[in-house]
Amino acid sequence: MAVCTVYTIPSLNSTCSVSIPTKTYLGFHQRQVVLFSTSRRSSRRASSNTSEIRCSAEESKTVVIGLAADSGCGKSTFMRRLTSVFGGAAEPPKGGNPDSNTLISDTTTVICLDDYHSLDRTGRKEKGVTALDPKANNFDLMYEQVKALKDGISVEKPIYNHVSGLLDPPELIKPPKILVIEGLHPMYDSRVRDLLDFSIYLDISNEVKFAWKIQRDMAERGHSLESIKASIEARKPDFDAYIDPQKQYADAVIEVLPTQLIPGDNGGKVLRVKLVMKEGVKFFSPVYLFDEGSTISWIPCGRKLTCSYPGIKFFYGPDTYFGHEVSVLEMDGQFDRLDELIYVESHLSNISTKFYGEVTQQMLKHSDFPGSNNGTGFFQTIVGLKIRDLYEQIITSKAAAPLEAAKA
Ligand SMILES: Nc1ncnc2c1ncn2[C@@H]1O[C@H](COP(=O)(O)OP(=O)(O)OP(=O)(O)O)[C@@H](O)[C@H]1O
Ligand SMILES: O=C(CO)[C@H](O)[C@H](O)COP(=O)(O)O
């Protein structure tokens, strides 16, 4: 008697490798793989061995990147640098909600996790919670929707409207080549964290965060110094409890600190920026200066790099970060002339450029973005190129997988 076993493929985009047991016939119907067997014995064998059909999220097409940081810490600027690496402009969904937080380009879709706030502005006020508190966010929905997109399935994502403070009707998000989830909590929930192919944390020290807030909210938005201080203080306990701990999970951390070149300087104009890169991350090889694994301190100011006071200092070396082995590249100071950046770029290795001087070209292209004359812009650009490289490696390995399976 013929017996049939049915397996469901997670999505139509998934690539499944199937090994067919002897004397078993195979049929496909939409998302289902059907195994017909001529005897109970071979059917039992087929259904008891799950490795015979392998359809996993790992084999889906959308690459998912997580970017975590507090509000006002440079996520949007970083996203603009990242999407520029892939070419094409990133724009809100056409004909959609003008207050959408989503940015779509040919290759990337950036969704803002503020859209998963479960409490609107009034709701948070009534319950006495901040937007940083997990209680104000819907992690079940975040997980389901990021997973669906990763598996190639479109979703109706909610919109948190920052103008009105309300939750607006949802917008349709189609699975892109690269999905970036940016916001307060991309690595907070372990289910969402496990979906990430690469994660970044922007770690802005309190002094610098304060200086940037003053610059934006006081100079550009007319807020008072007292209200800025009060808002930072009100968020700090939840920031420390729920946002900051995510950095331990990040594959790359960009840490922004006051300079050490001017003793006692906290003004946030001259910055010391560290790029902390985890070792052993699949498809990611840390950048190095001169000699991989060694410890190097380098002052490049001289004939090829113009430096005015207080100069520029680089450091590179191995370290540990939350118990993980990491490589750290550090830059303190700022560039006088962006075109001369090529001198520094040419001394770095593993930067995943496609041609000589690509980092410098990107930096010159966006010289008006905040941080273009220091390590924030420089390292964000390099991380953008590393993400492009990671994406290309993942796609290549996925394309090769069915061929390898067929050969075996
Ligand atoms: N590298 C930088 N150097 C100097 N200032 C910066 C830098 N990055 C960001 N800023 C300052 O912080 C402000 C916020 O930057 P950005 O919009 O990129 O951050 P964000 O994390 O997306 O903010 P939000 O979550 O509030 O939308 C900028 O307007 C600028 O004033
Ligand atoms: O931390 C934030 C992330 O951007 C915002 O404060 C949060 O999303 C709430 O937004 P709003 O202040 O517009 O109500």
Image: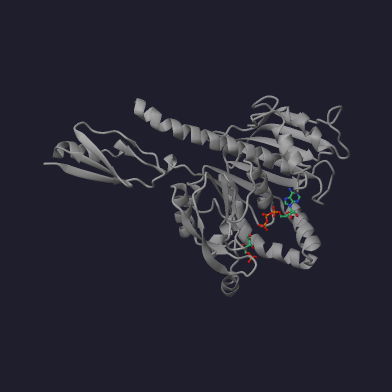
Using the image as rendered, state which of residue 94 and residue 208 is in the foreground. 94
Q: Residue furthest front?
A: 95
Tell me how the rendering is colored.
one colour
Name the quarter showing ligand 2.
bottom right
Query: What residue sits 69% from the left and 35% below the top?
Result: 329
Q: How many marks on residues?
A: 0
- x, y (%) of residue 48? 24, 40
Quarter of the view holding residue 242: bottom right
Q: Residue at x 58, y 75 (%)?
A: 126
Query: Quadrant of residue 372 in the image?
Result: top right
Q: Is residue 281 left or right of residue 403?
A: right
Which residue appears farthest toward the right when viewing the image? 309
Residue 362 percent coordinates (x, y) = 71, 39
> Quick one: 49 or 167, which is closer to the camera?
167
Residue shown at 63%/65% (left/top)? 162
Instruction: Indicate the position of residue 361 as horizontal and vertical percent values.
Output: 73, 36
Residue 110 appears in the picture as rendered: yes
Asked whether the viewer can see residue 278, the reply is no
Quadrant location of the N terminus in the rendered image: top left
Residue at (14% x, 41% y) in the render: 2
Is 339 on the left or on the right of 394, as rendered?
right
Look at the picture and state if 394 lies above or below 163. above
* Image vertical order of residue 370 relative to residue 309, above or below: below
Horizontal side of 223 relative to 41 (left or right) equals: right
Q: Position of residue 75 (x, y in %)?
A: 66, 51
Residue at the bottom extreme of this rendering: 126
Q: Residue 364 falls in which quadrant of the image?
A: top right
In the image, residue 79 sits, relative to residue 100, either above or below, namely above
Asked if 267 appears above or below 131 in the picture, the reply is: above
Q: Quadrant of the C terminus?
A: top left
